[in-house]
Image (tube, rainbow, N blue to C red):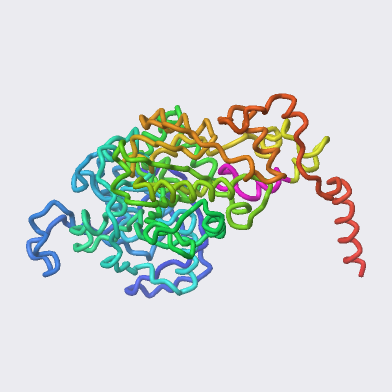
Amino acid sequence: FFPFFPFLLPVHAAEDPNSKTKHNSNSIGIFTMSIAPRAAKKPRTSKSPPSALISAINDDIPVPETTSLDYVNLTSHTDTFGVDPIPISWGHPDPSIRGPVICTVRHSSQRNAIGAHSGSYCIYTGLAVAAGKLNPDYLPNLKLTSPVFNIGPHSSWSDPKKIASIDPFGHLTTDVYGGYLNKGFDIRPTIAVTKAHIDLPETREAVAAGRLVPDGKILLAGGQSIVSKAAIEPVWYLPEIARRFGCTETMLRQSIFRMTNGMYPELITRPDIKIFLPPIGGLTIYIWGDPDTIPDEDIELTCRVHDECNGSDVFGSDICTCRPYLTHAIEECIKTAQRGGAGVVIYFRKEGRSLGEVTKYLVYNTRKRQEGGDSAENYFNCTEQVAGVQDTRFQALMPDPLHFLGVTRIHNFISMSDMKYNAIVNTGIEIVNRVEIPKELVPDDAQVEITAKVYHGYNAGKAYQHIDEKELKKTVGREYAYGKPEEKKKNVVENVVKNVVE
């Protein structure tokens, strides 16, 4: 009956209160990779329902089945007894027919998504439960969490080819799925929509220099800009994700399962579940001006899609152009909003080209230590030497938040990336103008990056037309007194031996 070999796991087995046998905390529990059977399946409706469910008897919303946490499931299987996921029809324009994304631990038999909420932060939730700080049965109070401004709905919401990596109804949980919440379902929003004031030193400098003029509406006298923003967790519709990457859904599932060291067995055992909440960073959308103008092609829209760079964006590292380009985009967004349009910055958590910050720093060391120094000519080769690939951002999923906003035309695209440009226009969005970073904003040590990128295909605009093979070969970055790896290794070994002897 069970297609997998049983696993032996050290667990604290749940005690049967009617049994006289005591379980040792160090005993070995035997679990198969199958959902644990229940004594009896709860009915969808009841002839004598409790008062809380009386008003819901005649609707199509099933009764929630709460999962006991007294046992551990390594995985579940399609068509196993007790498995009854809430139907979901991705791409349907009616949210009640589309169905809610259910990926919480309370309804394991009715879950229709693999993974967990909060991306990689779900691990901290587990730590909170282990430390006794969080009750795993806690239900969030969402009464005051609804969006403070409207987004959508747009026609793109019902087209999986335009939205497959986020849930377009993820911010409307309390509105469109209130019936499920009232019945006791634990459904979490995957999008939060709010407003804020942003205070950047570069914006204050632009005011002081006269490039920006406070208007009291978009930009305050002190240099603060007023924004609308949305935080978004990834929600993947696997069939469309596979199509975009040119592989089968089976190959996609197997590849993720393998490269996460078997973290999500249900990618293999539950082909009926098509939704996956991956353990990766999400994104944030920042909007200057009226969000309602964004879908209007006749109203100016300025946009930058920016990938996270902690070293530059937060701490001002000058080895790349990330923060200068980001703050320049914000300045242009403010100007556009003051002209009656809207400015949008989409900030993806894709640190180090989605290779991670550790890998990025290893690449930095390789660049600085290589023969001939940090050269523009070998800029991309160093990344591939360390990571095996130049870039894992790809961009196939990147346009989705633009379609979530209803974007069909971008008048000013603040980016030189051909990968981003091509990904956007290939989904039907028109880009009128491409805006390169002003030369005076490029830090000295970032000349290596900008030269390499332009030479290898980034849009040069008017500012970087001079970059050719000669420029590529002569552009070298700052030298650091790193020393050769062999020398460093020798010093480390000598210090370790010295400490041991002492």
- Residue at 45% x, 71% y is 23
Height in image: 15 above or below 199? below
Q: Estimate the x, y position of residue 434 in percent, counting from the top left.
A: 49, 33
Q: Estimate the x, y position of residue 185 in percent, counting from the top left.
A: 25, 60
As rendered, which of 3 and 454 lies closer to the eye? 454
Which portion, as a residue range, is magenta? 351-364
Q: Estimate the x, y position of residue 15 in percent, counting from the top left.
A: 39, 71
Height in image: 147 above or below 405? below
- Picture quarter with the N terminus: top left
Height in image: 92 above or below 148? above
Residue 16: which quarter of the image?
A: bottom left
- As drawn, is 330 to the left or to the right of 94? right
As rendered, which of 64 and 75 lies closer to the eye? 64
Q: Residue furthest top?
A: 469
- Residue at 49% x, 53% y is 212
Q: Estimate the x, y position of residue 50 in percent, counting from the top left.
A: 12, 68
- As drawn, is 383 to the left or to the right of 496? left
- As drawn, is 467 to the left or to the right of 272? right
Q: Residue furthest front?
A: 210
In magenta segment, residue 352 = yes
Height in image: 474 above or below 50? above
As rendered, which of 20 and 277 lies closer to the eye? 277
In magenta segment, residue 332 = no
As rendered, which of 314 and 36 lies closer to the eye? 314
- Residue at 54% x, 41% y is 259
Number of marks in the rendered image? 0
- Picture quarter with the C terminus: bottom right
